[in-house]
């Protein structure tokens, strides 16, 4: 029997065509970048970027491997900041979210409001920049890459809601009667029950730190502390500068001729996107679940 | 939603309360207060100090004198800002782009969510969702590389297409005419997959027996969608839209800074409040202008958020922020 709550085959076919076009639009730029990275530099300068590589060359990757220390170092900074930042953030957020989720905690609404207010009003870039540079003096330190994303107010509220709705008060009460201290209850009982929300917020944190180029743009001049994203930003700027000033700088034309700049920059992009694409199938599901947790009112 | 009212009420009592009682409370729950401490420190540094630092907009900031000793100048900085061409330009761009983003997100993302739900082959539907969700995971720097591969004037994919089909190539990064469209397309590319998944979550939750009842009455699937599903989605659409309207004075710095590659000729159509503040702070070193624009954004933004939330409350109390 025909199911009247489903679309018919013809409509399904048409929609599939539309979806395939949308999907192509989503991946097309990625394919062009990948093709460019495995094409000969001269071919690219002559024929431009194309969907299917016109020839095959790994010269751009070889060039990057010659300067592998710079790339590895940036990878290292990114990894270090991502791991410490996400972990610290998860600890700080859950520590804060727990007391304000406890109905018997007297000033919980005051401390909730302290977080909440920051979502409505903030001082903006200038005073924030000055606090980091003139008060804390943490520009050009790893701290400047970690501190900005430690307490995302929305995540605190999401976690608080999760604690309030899924962790029965009775369990906490029972733990107290058994003589467990507050902190012990939190670590032994509350956290294990909160694994789903910890995983989701942890992943959002990882993505934030991994993709961050804004904090280094503001606070980092020291090349040793460039992370991967910011290195990409600087490489792009450098190539742009060289090609704009090719006439005015001695040797610049020569430098440009020897540097596989167009293909090497795309190889950089591939190296930066690679891990995300490879890990994508595994973590994507948690993000989708996270979006639904996130829609619970904070 | 009543959180804030409660907070305000209890806050009144916090101030009035006698010290010994407060100390007693602190002693009783000292572990809980200790747990709050790291978060409070981070909030202090990231949010509360800058919140008070906003008064810098009323000072003639001088690097050697520093924050405290710089002279107060009243509304001087604002006079300069609002007499410049930039004030109108950045306000217009910020608001118009946001409105375009809101309208497009509310139409394309909703349409996509419906299609994801309708496709007969579940596996294919999941595949499309995954692919369209992918751009959300890429940083603006990476996306600027992707866009450059398309738009570069001498090697870009699009110019090659134009030349091959006998048309004139375009100097994309110099010609401001196309940028409103490019910015909107890139933003849609990055966010639509994400938005549509939120809407899809709403659709999946609807009671399917309603469609069956409509089908018995002879409604086609298309009618079930337009007359039942879309109306049922309206609360979610309204709320998400109003939340975005609340943020209409704030933009995504990365989109407007990285995608046009900081190209001067494009500023008229790509400069927004965030990029203006950044350039004034870091490139021209004009602290007065930067902080005045920041203050303007914070205050107007705050008023807009409160208004949007007030409207959300009127429509659906449970969906409001507070």
Image (cartoon, rainbow, N blue to C red):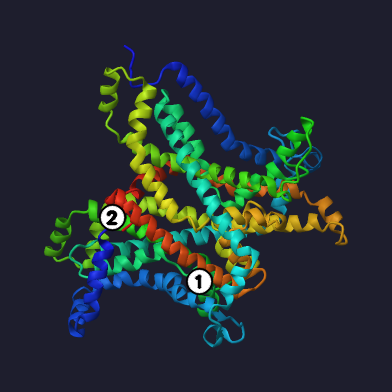
The picture places residue B135, in percent across and down from the top left corner, at 53, 43
What residue does disc 1 label? A128
Q: Is any part of residue B255 visible from this angle?
A: yes
At x 59%, y 60%, the residue is B90
Q: Quick one: quadrant of the C terminus of chain B?
A: bottom left
User: Which chain is home to disc 1?
Assistant: A
The picture places residue B212, in percent across and down from the top left corner, at 27, 22
Q: Quick one: quadrant of the N terminus of chain B?
A: bottom left
B113 relative to B83, above or below: above
**Mark 1 element type:** helix
The picture places residue A65, in percent across and down from the top left corner, at 69, 51
The picture places residue B267, in percent across and down from the top left corner, at 67, 57
Residue B6: which disc?
Answer: none
Mark 2 to mark 1 CA distance (whole Å): 29 Å
Residue count near mark 1 (Cα–Cα under 10 Å), binned few <14, some 14–19, many ≥20 = many
Occupied quadrant, residue A96: bottom left
Occupied quadrant, residue A76: bottom right
B124 relative to B275, above or below: above
Q: Is any part of residue A271 visible from this angle?
A: no
Decide: marks 2, 1 in contact (CB < 8 A)?
no
At x 45%, y 21%, the residue is A12
What residue does disc 2 label? A161
**Mark 2 element type:** helix
Q: Is residue A89 left or right of residue B98?
A: left
């Amino acid at each position: 029997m025909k199911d009247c709550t489903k679309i018919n085959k013809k409509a399904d076919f048409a929609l599939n065509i539309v979806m395939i076009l949308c999907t192509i639009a989503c991946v097309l730029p990625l394919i062009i970048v990948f093709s460019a990275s495995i094409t000969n530099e001269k071919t690219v300068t002559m024929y431009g970027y194309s969907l299917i590589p016109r020839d095959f060359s790994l010269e751009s990757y070889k060039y990057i491997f010659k300067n592998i220390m710079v790339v590895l170092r940036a990878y290292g900074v990114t990894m270090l900041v991502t791991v410490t930042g996400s972990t610290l953030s998860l600890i700080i957020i859950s520590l804060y979210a727990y007391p304000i989720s406890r109905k018997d905690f007297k000033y919980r609404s005051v401390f909730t409001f302290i977080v909440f207010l920051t979502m409505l009003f903030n001082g903006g870039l200038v005073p924030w920049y000055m606090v980091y540079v003139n008060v804390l003096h943490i520009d050009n330190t790893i701290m400047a890459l970690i501190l900005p994303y430690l307490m995302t107010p929305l995540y605190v509220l999401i976690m608080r809601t999760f604690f309030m709705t899924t962790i029965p008060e009775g369990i906490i009460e029972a733990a107290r009667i058994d003589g467990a201290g507050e902190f012990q209850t939190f670590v032994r009982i509350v956290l294990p029950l909160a694994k789903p929300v910890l995983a989701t917020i942890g992943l959002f944190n990882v993505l934030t730190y991994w993709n961050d180029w804004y904090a280094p743009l503001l606070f980092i001049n020291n090349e040793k502390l460039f992370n991967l994203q910011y290195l990409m930003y600087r490489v792009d700027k450098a190539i742009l500068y060289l090609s704009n000033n090719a006439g005015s700088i001695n040797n610049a034309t020569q430098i440009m001729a020897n540097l596989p700049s167009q293909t090497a920059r795309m190889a950089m992009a591939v190296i930066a996107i690679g891990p995300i694409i490879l890990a994508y199938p595994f973590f994507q599901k948690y993000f989708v679940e996270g979006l639904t947790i996130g829609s619970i009112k904070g | 939603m009543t959180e804030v009212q409660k907070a305000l009420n209890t806050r009144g009592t916090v101030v009035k309360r006698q010290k010994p009682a407060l100390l007693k409370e602190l002693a009783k729950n000292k572990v809980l207060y200790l747990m709050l401490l790291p978060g409070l420190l981070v909030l202090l540094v990231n949010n509360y100090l800058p919140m008070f630092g906003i008064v810098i907009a009323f000072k003639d900031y001088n690097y050697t004198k520093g924050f405290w000793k710089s002279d107060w100048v009243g509304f001087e900085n604002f006079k300069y800002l609002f007499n410049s061409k930039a004030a109108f330009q950045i306000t217009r761009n910020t608001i118009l782009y946001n409105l375009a983003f809101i309208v497009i997100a509310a139409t394309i993302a909703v349409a996509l969510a419906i299609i994801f739900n309708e496709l007969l082959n579940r596996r294919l539907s999941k595949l499309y969702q995954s692919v369209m969700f992918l751009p959300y995971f890429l940083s603006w720097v990476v996306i600027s590389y992707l866009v450059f591969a398309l738009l570069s004037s001498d090697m870009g994919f699009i110019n090659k297409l134009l030349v091959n089909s006998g048309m004139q190539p375009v100097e994309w990064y110099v010609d401001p005419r196309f940028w409103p469209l490019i910015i909107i397309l890139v933003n849609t590319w990055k966010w639509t997959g994400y938005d549509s998944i939120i809407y899809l979550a709403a659709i999946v939750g609807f009671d399917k027996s309603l469609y069956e009842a409509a089908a018995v009455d002879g409604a086609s699937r298309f009618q079930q969608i337009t007359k039942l599903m879309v109306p049922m989605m309206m609360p979610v659409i309204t709320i998400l839209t109003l939340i975005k309207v609340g943020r209409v004075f704030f933009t995504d710095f990365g989109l407007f800074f990285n995608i046009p590659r900081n190209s001067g000729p494009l500023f008229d159509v790509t400069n927004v409040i965030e990029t203006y503040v950044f350039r004034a702070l870091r490139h021209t070193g004009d602290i007065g202008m930067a902080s005045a624009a920041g203050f303007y954004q914070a205050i107007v933004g705050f008023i807009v958020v409160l208004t949007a939330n007030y409207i959300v409350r009127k429509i659906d109390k449970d969906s409001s922020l507070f």
